Image: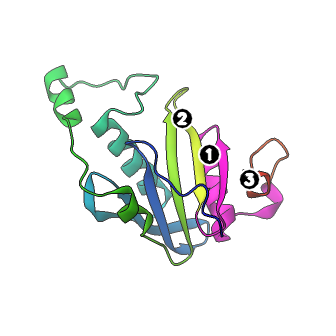
Amino acid sequence: MSKSQWYIGAPNGVVLCVDGAEGQSINGRLYHGYRREALPVRNIEQLLFEMEHFYDSINFPHPGTSSRTFQHRTEQTRHTAERARIMSDEELLSRHGDLGTFIIRVQHRQNSSWQGRITWMDEDKTVYFRSMWEMLKLIDSAVGTADQQEESLDEPSWADHEE
């Protein structure tokens, strides 16, 4: 295995370790460079919530749309304080899940979704995604929870991976 795509490369890069799957949902751990302990992930919704909260906390990538809130701006900006990285890329890349391990690099948060690239470490394959939905379908197809009949010719797949 060449491990050509095994890098974090951005302050918002995360490593998702999938340890189990039940039905069409996954569970596991999420790691990022600003926290040594894993964030437990019990389902897809929690994964998306934790990632969105992390991106908001470091303010990167900057969202294309603003959240509507009743909070005062001073309370809102308190959550986006400057953070220091405490975990190196090498430490992040040493984490592995029982069913699969993924490096997720969200490059943009536009159109109320995410765009970026995901690397399936177990297969050393990287695919670009255009939405959260595409990212989740790639994860599901890698760990075997996706319904194979749902695949579309227009959606990215692991078969279209970069070399």
Three-letter code for the amino acid on which mark 1 is drawn: Trp
Q: Which residues are magenta?
A: 121-150
Q: Is residue 146 magenta?
A: yes
In front: 102, or 44? 102
Distance Cα–Cα, label 2 vs label 1: 9 Å
Residue 147: quarter of image: bottom right
Residue 146 screen position, x and y as percent: 70, 63
Distance Cα–Cα, label 2 vs label 3: 22 Å
Of the numbered discs 2 and 1, the one sitting upstream in the chain is 2
Residue 31: quarter of image: bottom left
Of the numbered discs 2 and 3, the one sitting upstream in the chain is 2
Q: Which residue is mark 3?
A: 161
Left or right position of 106 against 52: right
Q: Residue at x 21, y 45 (%)?
A: 84
Q: Secondary structure at mark 1?
A: helix
Q: Which residue is mark 1?
A: 133
Residue 120 screen position, x and y as percent: 61, 61
Q: Is residue 163 magenta?
A: no
Q: Which residue is mark 2?
A: 113
Q: Residue at x 32, y 53 (%)?
A: 33
Of the numbered discs 3 and 1, the one sitting upstream in the chain is 1
Left or right position of 39 against 17: left
Q: Secondary structure at mark 3?
A: loop
